[in-house]
Amino acid sequence: MITLLIATRNTHKVEEIRTILGGRFQYRTLNDFPDAPKVVEDAPTFAGNAIKKAVELAQWVGRTQSPQSTVHSPESTLHSPQFFVLADDSGLEVDALGGAPGVHSARFAGPEGGGSENSFSALNNAKLLRLLKDVPAEKRTGRFRCVLAVSTVVPQERESASPVCQATEAELLAELFEGACEGRITQAPRGQGGFGYDPLFVPEGHEQTFGELGQEVKNRLSHRARALEKLKQWFEGGGVERRA
């Protein structure tokens, strides 16, 4: 079975990924690795941040987890070609704001601090609506975009003597999968479902927001769902075997 370390502690995101990818994978999250480093997402693009997270975490696992694990230990799969780190970066691009909030979607209202996930979402949503206050409905277009990066965990003994060269090689070997969902921004939040900007976003071809449509519909339409479908096809099409 392929093991995926999902590079997040966000329970909403983990459930969405598990629901879409299904049961052929064994799932781990950063909650299983409390000592994992926090990767600074300072790249100017979704792809750059996704690659950075996947590669840095895969390298950390390769350096710090013992390859001498017993077969029943969770770490026993970490050094197999069937073990991958899956990271993503995603966000909302609003045309009237020149593509903002973009890579700053999670921190649009300011640096993350001690508040809850819901409080940050409320602040982000309030700022977005404030900036779009005078923008007419026909110009409130935008999209959710997601880029997934998959990196193989490399045991320490296989790492290059040059950390820079090794990182560059790992970045080049990372697989990328992108998905987007076009839609428009509402005048006010609608619905209690989803998370983040979901109550403000009406996907193309619908009249309800992601906050109203429900998880089952969102899992068919969302940017992450479309990227995950490409990832799923890559695994099913022998992508792992071609890399081995």
Image: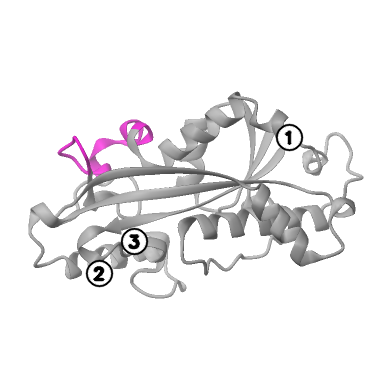
Q: Residue at x 81, y 43 (%)?
A: 79
Specify which label sits upstream in the sequence, 3 or 2. 3
Left or right side of 239 for 196: left
The picture quadrant where one finds residue 175 is top right
**Image side of residue 48 versus residue 31, left or right:** left
Query: In the figure, residue 205 lies in which quadrant?
Result: top left
Q: Give x and y (percent) for residue 154.
A: 79, 49
Q: Nearer the viewer, mark 2 or mark 1?
A: 1
Three-letter code, disc 2: Lys
Residue 144 in magenta? no
Which comes sooner in the sequence, label 3 or label 1? 1
What residue sits right under mark 1 in the picture? 82
Q: Considering only vertical position in the picture, is 218 above or below 42? A: above
Residue placed under numbered mark 2 in the picture: 127
Asked whether the viewer can see residue 19, the reply is no
Residue range highlighted in magenta:
203-220
Q: Is residue 208 magenta?
A: yes
Q: Tell me the amino acid under the disc marked 3.
A: Ser
